[in-house]
Image: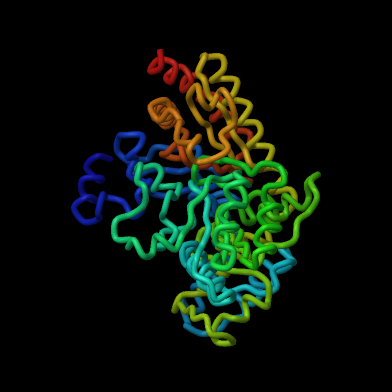
Amino acid sequence: MADLFDRACRSIPGGVSSPVRAFGSVGGTPVFIDHASGPLLYDTEGREYVDAVGSWGPALLGHAHPEVVAAVQQAAAKGLSFGAPTLGEVELAEMIRERVPVADKVRFVSTGTEATMTALRLARGATGRSLIVKFAGCYHGHSDGLLSQAGSGVATAGLPGSAGVTPETAAQTIVIPFNDVAALEATFRRFPDQIAALITEPAPANMGVVPPLPGFNRTLRELTAQYGALLIFDEVLTGFRVHRAGWWGLEQSGAEPTMAAPDLFTFGKVVGGGMPLAAIAGKAAVMDLLAPLGPVYQAGTLSGNPLATAAGRATLRLADTEVYRHVDEVSATIQTGITDALSHAGVPHRVQPAGSLFTVFFGEAAAAAPFQNYAQAQQLDARSYAAFFHAMLAAGVALPPSGYEAWFFSAAHDDAAVSRVLAALPGAAESVAAVTR
C-alpha cells in the first residue's frame, strides 16, 4: 500500500483527490479501495473491511446494490451524457418533492459545493443583500465564501480557512457559534437589512456530530423571517439519510412543535445514490429566480446527468421505511457496543448521535458534557481517536480517518457485519487505554 501511495503522490497533490483521505490526522498510509459490496470494502491487496464510512453518506443501501447498479447500467447503455433534458431528472425531482413536500421545485447540479454556492447566489438575488451568516464548524462545501471556520477536512487539517480566499470575500460571511441564540440575535440586530441568508446544517455532522438544541432550528426560522433573510438547510449529509425526508422530516415527526419550512434545501450524497449529483430545492418564489426564468444564473453540462439520476431514482425508490428502521437499529447497537467497550477500558469519551449518525468524541471534556459547538468539539482527543482508528482498521473495520466526521451505516449491514464491528471494539478500546495511561 505504501508503494501505491508513493506512486499516487507523484501524480496527485498529497496522493489523494480529497484531503481527509490522506490519513493526515490519524497517521499512516491511506487504504486504496479496489471494490465494495454490501457492507464490505476490499483494498487493492485483497483485505476485507466492514465499512463505517459509506462513501461519506451515499451508501444508504450498501455498496453496489444490484438494483442500483442495474439502473446505472441500463442508463449507460443509452448514452452517458446528452446536455439536454431527460425524463429521468423530472422523475427524480418529483420523488424529492414527494418526500419533502415543502420543496416546490428542484434544480440539479453535480456536487454539494455547487448546490450550496447556488443557494447563496439565489438568496442574494432574492433579497438584494450581500451578507451570509453561517455557524462555526458547519461545512458547506469548498466555495470561497463558506470556508471560514468550516468543519470536515478543514477542521481535520487544523486550518482556519483556505489560502486563496480574499479578505473581501471572507468579509461577506459572518461566522457565529452553533446553538448560540444570543449570538444570532445580536448578529441580526447589528445587520438588520444586510443579511441575505443564514445557512446551516440542521444537524451538523462535519465538526463531529453536534445536534441542535431543542427548538434551535425553529428559532432560526423565526429570526430569518423577522429580518427578511432566507433560511437554507444544507442537508447534503442528512438529506434522505436520517429519514425519508431528511432532518427536516425527522424534526417534523418528533415531539417538538413543527416549524415553518426553510426557504431552500441543498441535497447531495444519498440523492445521487453514489453518483456525482446534488440538488437545490425550495419555495417556487425563490427557485423561479434561476435562469432561464429569472436573473440568477446557474448552469452545468453534467447537471442532471442521466446515469446519476438513474442511481438516485433507484436509491430513493428502495429506501423505504424498513431501510431507515434497520439503519437506526444498526447504529444504536453499535453505539451501545462502543460505549460498553470504552467504559470497560476506562477510556473517557462520549458517543454523540443525531438520528442514525454519530461521532465518538474522546477525552475528559467530551465525557464531562455533550459538545454543543465547534469550540467545544475542538477539545476532542485526536491521539486517542488515532489509536482507536488504527486498531479497528487492523481488526477489519474501516472508520472515518478523522475524529471530526460522522459514522455511516447501511441497510446492508447485517448481523454478521455488526458482529464483526462489536467484536473489534474491546481490543480497540484497550489500544486507546494503552496510549492514555
Quadrant in the rendering for residue 418: top right
- Residue closest to the eye, 258 or 44: 258
Colour mapping used in the image: rainbow
Q: Is residue 125 above or below residue 265?
A: below
Which residue is at the far front?
190
> Does residue 306 appear in this view?
no
**Number of dots carrying numbers:** 0
Q: In x, y percent, where is residue 337?
A: 60, 25
Q: In x, y percent, where is residue 251?
A: 73, 50
Q: In x, y percent, where is residue 229?
A: 62, 66
Q: Is residue 224 above or below residue 153?
A: below
- Residue closest to the eye, 78 or 133: 133
Residue positioned 57% across, 64% down in the render = 197
- Residue closest to the eye, 436 or 428: 436
**Which quarter of the image is occupied by the N terminus?**
top left
Q: Is residue 37 above or below residue 105?
A: above
Residue positioned 52% across, 80% down in the render = 296
Quadrant in the rendering for residue 351: top right
Residue positioned 25% across, 54% down in the render = 13
> Does residue 262 appear in this view?
yes
**Which quarter of the image is occupied by the C terminus?**
top left
Judge left or right: residue 373 versus residue 159. right
Q: In x, y percent, where is residue 309?
A: 57, 70
Q: Is residue 87 above or below residue 315?
A: below
